[in-house]
Image (tube, grey):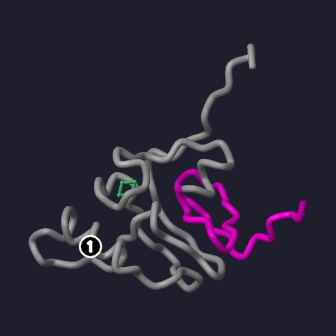
Amino acid sequence: MAERAPTARVLVEPLGVVFELGQNDTLMSAAQRAGYYWPTICQGNAQCNRCVVRVIDGRGLMPYTPTELAGLRSVRWRDGAEDHSERLACQLRAAGDATVHKRGVRAIERSSAE
Ligand code: FES
């Protein structure tokens, strides 16, 4: 089986962990695959906005998709003020390196019985 070739590295602060995103990964899915908890209620359906990150360096990030914009406009940007430093990690893809800020991301503890 071919190895998944990472296409981008996204640093998540204040945790200080870098996640490698393949072509089809979102930031949240890459973090979950790596064994990290990422805040979510809707499980990646662009509805809850719990996954939102603040972009520190967004040079490598892909543009908003219509789904991501609709999700932000229905919750965080409901009053019409759009803060384009905010992105939904469940929709966010990257083609190059970037840095974002997100509290609540943490390594999932594994019990010693596993
Ligand atoms: S996980 Fe719910 S909006 Fe991203």
Q: Is residue 38 above or below residue 11?
A: above
Measuring from the top left, give residue 11's x and y in whole percent: 61, 64
Q: Give SS at disc 1.
A: helix
Residue shown at the point (60%, 44%) measured from the top left: 36
- Residue that numbered label 1 is attached to: 70
Give the magenta range.
1-28
Q: Would you identify the image quadrant in which residue 109 lies?
A: top right
How far across and down, in percent of the image, does residue 101 sit? Answer: 47, 62
Q: Residues within 10 Å of mark 1 (few under 14, many from 20)?
A: some
Relative height, residue 78 to residue 13 (above, below): below
Instruction: Determine whether, in the image, residue 76 is placed left or right of residue 13.
Output: left
Instruction: Return the residue found at the far top.
Output: 113
Measuring from the top left, give residue 91's x and y in whole percent: 45, 67
Determine the residue positioned at 20% across, 62% down: 75
Say which residue appears at 80% left-offset and 71% top-offset.
5
Q: Is mark 1 within 8 Å of ligand 1?
A: no
Q: Amino acid at mark 1?
A: Ala
Answer whether residue 10 is magenta in the image: yes
**Is 19 a magenta residue?**
yes
* Quadrant of the snapshot with the N terminus: bottom right
Residue 63's place in the image compared with 40, above or below, is below
